[in-house]
Image: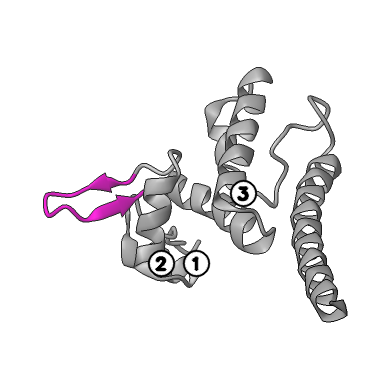
Amino acid sequence: MAYKEKEIEKLYYSIGEVAKMFDVNTSHIRFWSKEFDVIKPATNKKGNRMYTQSDIDNFKKIYHLVKEKGFTLKGAKVELKDTKTKMKLAGTPAMAFTETVSESFIEPGLFAEPEVKDDFVDKIALMNSLRKIRKSLIDIQGQLTQLEV
């Protein structure tokens, strides 16, 4: 029987490693760490930020909401807070909160099916897009009014 070596999982990741994971600058990671309360990096004696797997999972959620779904930072904060509140109300253990966004935030049958949650997030992204389109149309209408005069 051959010996199978386990993959080594790190306890802490440097800010550079986290930045590489998400293909962003380290300043981006520092900014999100300050903006979002769910990310609480430890610091070593030199003052370097050290991120846990839980922090990485929270970064995944934030990245998904902000970069992929088009949420504003404020909207992402609200979404994360709402999700955490729903998890507490459902009696779900705190560890379940570290699931990735692409997975269901809510256990099936407690509040809604995962499709409903994704549908809700899509509706918010659509609403943000429609607001931008509306603003553009108002700008165009103003320009047309100026041309008519």
Q: Which residue is mark 2?
A: 19
- The magenta stretch spans residue 47: yes
State which region is magenta. Answer: 41-52
Task: Please provide percent x and percent y for residue 70.
Answer: 67, 59
- The number of discs equals 3
Q: Which residue is mark 3?
A: 100
The amino acid type, in three-letter code, at marker 3 is Thr
Instruction: Looking at the picture, tell me which residue is in the foreground, 130 or 118.
Output: 130
Instruction: Please report whichever mark, 3 or 2, sits nearer to the chain's N-terminal start.
Output: 2
- The magenta stretch spans residue 98: no
> Pointers 1 and 2 in contact (CB under 8 A)?
yes
The quadrant holding residue 107 is: top right
Q: Is residue 8 visible?
A: no
Mark 1 residue element? helix
In the rendered image, which quarter contains the C terminus? bottom right
Residue extending furthest toward the left = 45
Q: Is residue 5 left or right of residue 92?
A: left
> Pointers 1 and 3 in contact (CB under 8 A)?
no
Q: Is residue 56 left or right of residue 115?
A: left
Task: Please provide percent x and percent y for residue 113.
Answer: 84, 36
The amino acid type, in three-letter code, at marker 1 is Phe
Q: Nearer the viewer, mark 1 or mark 3?
A: 1
Q: Which residue is mark 1?
A: 22
